[in-house]
């Protein structure tokens, strides 16, 4: 698709982001029952015991809606946290959330728990993405928030990172560098792929 000699990594990532957003919109428009299909696949595949601190995310526009999964995990005794941004080039913090809690605007069209909510380090992260490959790498939005956060969390304890996506977002190879963190799983409406 690209001549690696003449196109920079950033340019390749930007081109793939543009293409992936179009694919995601088409998948979103075609597959309205994906939130329940994804919930069922995650619960059937991953052993997530009560007490696990699980980071989800609030859906942006045509992202997968994790709310059915987060509600099921909450009902099963998991502690749900949602990411919050604390500044450019900084890792995310993860604040407590329960179904029904109010969220506050966080920029970029996102919502997050209020700063007054308790922060805690997740054991399992459900990670958004624009594209993924079968080596366990994801393409995000370009801010590096999840890569920085995963690096920091993994330096402190064992965490499991699960990319959740429409299957239509699979690509042959995600452009990456040394800062890109590999995921432990990718789960789509069609399959679950474990890495490592």
Image: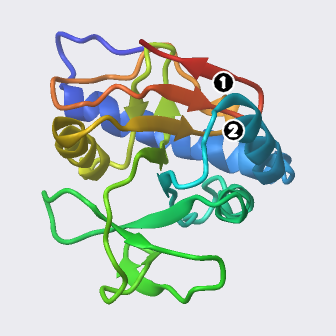
**What x and y, as percent, mark residue 139?**
39, 35
For residue 165, above or below residue 195? below
Residue 107 visible, this angle: yes
- Does residue 119 appear to the left or right of 6 in the view shown? right
For label 2, the SS is helix
**What x and y, as percent, mark residue 12?**
31, 28
- Residue at left offset 54%, top offset 67%: 58
Q: Quadrant of residue 105?
A: bottom left
Residue 19 visible, this angle: no
For residue 66, above or below residue 100? above
Q: Which mark is residue 192?
A: 1
Q: Earlier in the sequence, mark 2 or mark 1?
A: 2
Q: Nearer the viewer, residue 38 or 26?
A: 38
- Does residue 156 appear to the left or right of 43 in the view shown? left
Q: Are marks 2 and 1 in contact (CB under 8 Å)?
A: yes
For residue 184, above or below residue 106? above
Total tally of numbered discs in the picture = 2
Mark 2 sits on what residue?
A: 42
Query: How many residues crowd mark 2 within 10 Å: few (<14), some (14–19), many (20+)?
Result: many
Q: Which quadrant is the N terminus positioned in?
A: top left
- Residue at left offset 39%, top offset 22%: 174
Q: Nearer the viewer, residue 129 or 156?
A: 156
**What x and y, as percent, mark residue 192?**
66, 24
């Amino acid at each position: 698709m690209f001549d690696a000699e003449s196109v920079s990594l950033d340019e390749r990532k930007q081109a793939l982001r543009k293409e992936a957003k179009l694919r995601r919109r088409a998948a979103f428009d075609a597959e309205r029952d994906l939130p329940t299909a994804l919930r069922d696949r995650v619960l059937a595949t991953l052993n997530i015991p009560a007490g696990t601190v699980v980071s989800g995310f609030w859906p942006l526009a045509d992202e997968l809606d994790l709310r059915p999964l987060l509600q099921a995990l909450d009902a099963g005794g998991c502690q749900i946290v949602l990411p919050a941004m604390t500044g450019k080039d900084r890792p995310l913090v993860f604040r407590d959330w329960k179904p029904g809690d109010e969220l506050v605007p966080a920029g970029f069209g996102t919502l997050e728990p209020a700063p007054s909510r308790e922060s805690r380090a997740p054991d399992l992260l459900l990670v958004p993405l624009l594209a993924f490959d079968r080596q366990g790498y994801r393409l995000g939005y370009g801010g590096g928030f999840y890569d920085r956060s995963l690096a920091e969390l993994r330096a402190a304890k064992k965490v499991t990172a699960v990319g959740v996506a429409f299957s239509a977002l699979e690509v042959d190879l995600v452009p990456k560098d040394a800062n890109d963190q590999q995921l432990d799983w990718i789960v789509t409406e069609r399959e679950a792929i474990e890495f490592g």
